[in-house]
Image (tube, rainbow, N blue to C red):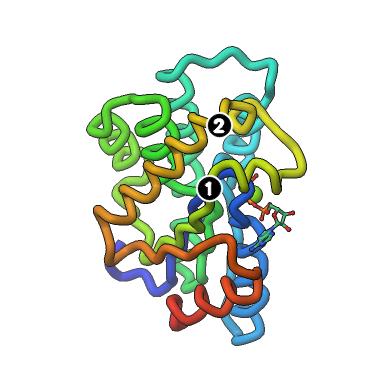
Amino acid sequence: MNNRTGFFLTIEGVEGAGKSTLAHELAKALRERGREVVVTQEPGGSALGNRIRELLLDKSSVIGNRAELLLFEAARAQHVDETILPALNRGAVVICDRYADSSLAYQGYARKIDRDKVEFLNNYATAGLKPDLTILLDLPAVEGLARQKKTDRVSSEKLEFHEAVRQGFIQLAKDEPKRFVVLDARQSIDDIIKKALGALNL
Ligand SMILES: Nc1ncnc2c1ncn2[C@@H]1O[C@H](COP(=O)(O)OP(=O)(O)OP(=O)(O)O)[C@@H](O)[C@H]1O
Ligand SMILES: [Mg+2]
């Protein structure tokens, strides 16, 4: 892990915070600077991960909290091995739309699974791979839900659930201030991109 030359950026935040928009805009800007950029997302990021994503997001799926956590972690393990590590090893910038912090916020803070258990499974699934930088797009859950174009099994949870997710992310950012950059997601997309590029310094 230590000899890799790439850069691993993750983007976190509640539903509709603007993660996917920022991931694509940052990729465009970094490619203009000549960097190889891989944009990927969780759950997903591999053929297996995309199939698990369909199961997780399908509104007709019945999934308990433990099964949900394990499915996210299984998708994550494959994502790291198949997509993220190879890209980092060849020197690419990897921009990942959600990663292990989402499990801490959703399955930990919002579904109330012990943080220790989520951390253990995150560590196992990622083989210890941590982001170099994490951008948290902070937004009141109610505003994110209003921005959303389509809903899925997880985003259809009640408002209190999504507000617990938001508070979880804020706590995670406080716990690891060196890794996290928190940006107010109510700013214009242009302002967010500018600040994110400044934080990245690539
Ligand atoms: N800073 C912003 N201000 C206003 N609207 C925004 C901003 N960023 C993104 N949007 C809009 O909000 C909507 C949701 O954005 P986006 O899909 O990027 O969010 P997301 O965090 O990826 O959501 P999800 O969690 O559902 O994947 C889109 O219509 C997008 O154009
Ligand atoms: Mg998105």
Residue 55 image offset from top left, x and y in percent: 63, 25
Asked if 127 appears above or below 28 in the picture, the reply is: above
What quarter of the picture does the N terminus occupy? bottom left
Residue 166 image offset from top left, x and y in percent: 45, 44
The amino acid sitting under disc 1 is Pro
Label placed on residue 159: 2
Asked if 149 appears above or below 9 in the picture, the reply is: above
Label placed on residue 186: none
Q: Relative to 142, is 201 on the left or the right?
A: left
Residue 196 image offset from top left, x and y in percent: 51, 73
Residue 102: quadrant of the picture:
top left
Q: Relative to 197, is 69 on the left or the right?
A: left
Query: Whole-Å distance between the Cαs marked 2 and 1?
Result: 10 Å
Q: Helix or strand or loop: what does disc 1 sit on? A: loop
The quadrant where ligand 1 appears is bottom right
Point 59% across, 13% down: residue: 62
Of marks 2 and 1, which one's residue comes earlier in the chain?
Answer: 1
Label 1 neighbour load within 10 Å: few <14, some 14-19, many 20+: some
Task: Give the residue number, with chain letter if any, for mark 1.
Answer: 140
Residue 29: quadrant of the picture:
bottom right
Point 59% across, 61% down: residue: 186
Residue 151 image offset from top left, x and y in percent: 71, 34
> Front-most of 4 and 101?
101
